[in-house]
Amino acid sequence: MSQSAETKLETSKQALEDGFYWTFQEEPHRSRRKAIIKAHPEVTKLCGPEPLTKYVVGGVVLLQFTLAYLLRNENFLSWKLWLCAYFIGATCCHNVFLAIHEMSHNLAFKKKIHNQLFAIFANLPIGIPYSAGFGPYHLLHHKYLGDNDYDTDLPTKLEAIVLSNVAGKAFFATFQILFYALRPMFVMTMPFTNIHHINIVVQAVADYFLVTYAGWRPLQYLLLSGFLAGSWHPIAGHFIAEHYVMDTPQQPIPKHKATPFEADDTSLPETYSYYGPLNIFVYNAGYHNEHHDFPYIPWTRLPELNRIAKEFYDPLPSHTSWFKVLFDFVLDSNVTLWNRVKRHKEEIDADDYENPS
């Protein structure tokens, strides 16, 4: 038996063990990236850092700390505190979450170290050090999209078994920020670096001075904002919207949903974009197919990529509302935590992830 046949047989056996969508085809962004560059070579000129990012981040960080200070006398149960935390604070948190995401791709400054250090600054209003840990895991998500071992954006089998019912999905949607923050550490251990230490020390010092000079309530506001950002917030649907298969597969799927599908049999969408107004708050994170196709194009130029390569993006399925995605995820019995596409490393050409410019 050939190595390829053995690999497919192994994948088939594994597919029958769980309900994820296992595929033999390469991840779609690699092939589409090559096709787009061939048809529109000028898109490579869109790559490179965006200087505007640091000014936006600076303003959002200042706004969030100003609000935290102004709300320093509000009780935790105060309606004013919760409204500000939900509508303004959580939106600010999403903004810095996605700013850190931009900097994980070195899209704010030319040098990697400058992006890492500024990401630590962007991390300050979150209250908990996370920027240094996010970067390495996120790059693996891009490099090994759908890989069972390296893509920590994928729910674990235990999560899918326990939470694939209405109550479980509601719990997941409510606490999804905790799942995305904690899952990577349980799935795969990454080495601790000096950047991690700097991130922890800088955040601890900032929290210490905030509590010392303004009391505990401002820090309480920052943490509440972060929690609400990753819960039932209009923008929070992007966590689920980006990669969960929300469409009915083009071929019949067994009840357990386990099927190793071939490229010529079906083409389940693995990534969904969103082109609505909420993109203005989160560095065009909704242009997610575009981002995965060209991870080195910054947020300000993703709409231009879409315009240039319109014939590639118009046919792809997309969402019209991130908030609606949250409700569809919880209430639609056909959508569960099993609705993710998985593949083995043998089907991934990670070397092609390099900056095409």
Image: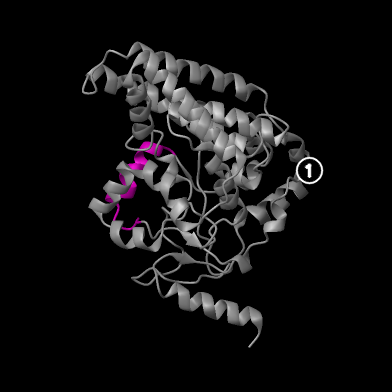
Task: Decide which of 57, 328 is in the foreground and name it.
Answer: 57
**Label 1 residue SS:** helix
| Residue that protrudes farthest toward the left in the picture | 77
Give the answer, above or below, for where 224 lies relative to 321.
Answer: above
* Relative to 168, 203 lies left or right: right
Task: Decide which of 103, 353 is in the foreground and name it.
Answer: 103
For badge 1, the amino acid type reads: Pro
* Image position, residue 34 (x, y; %): 72, 52
Question: Which portion, as a residue range, is magenta?
Answer: 320-336
* Image position, residue 253 (x, y; %): 40, 69
**Residue 221 in which image quadrant:** top left
* Relative to 48, 131 lies left or right: left
* Image position, residue 66 (x, y; %): 42, 13
Location of the N terminus (image quadrant):
bottom right
Residue positioned 67% across, 56% down in the render: 31
Task: Decide which of 202, 150 is in the foreground and name it.
Answer: 202
Location of the C terminus (image quadrant):
top right
* Image position, residue 356 (x, y; %): 76, 46
Residue positioned 38% across, 17% down in the render: 212
| Residue with the mark numbered 1 | 41
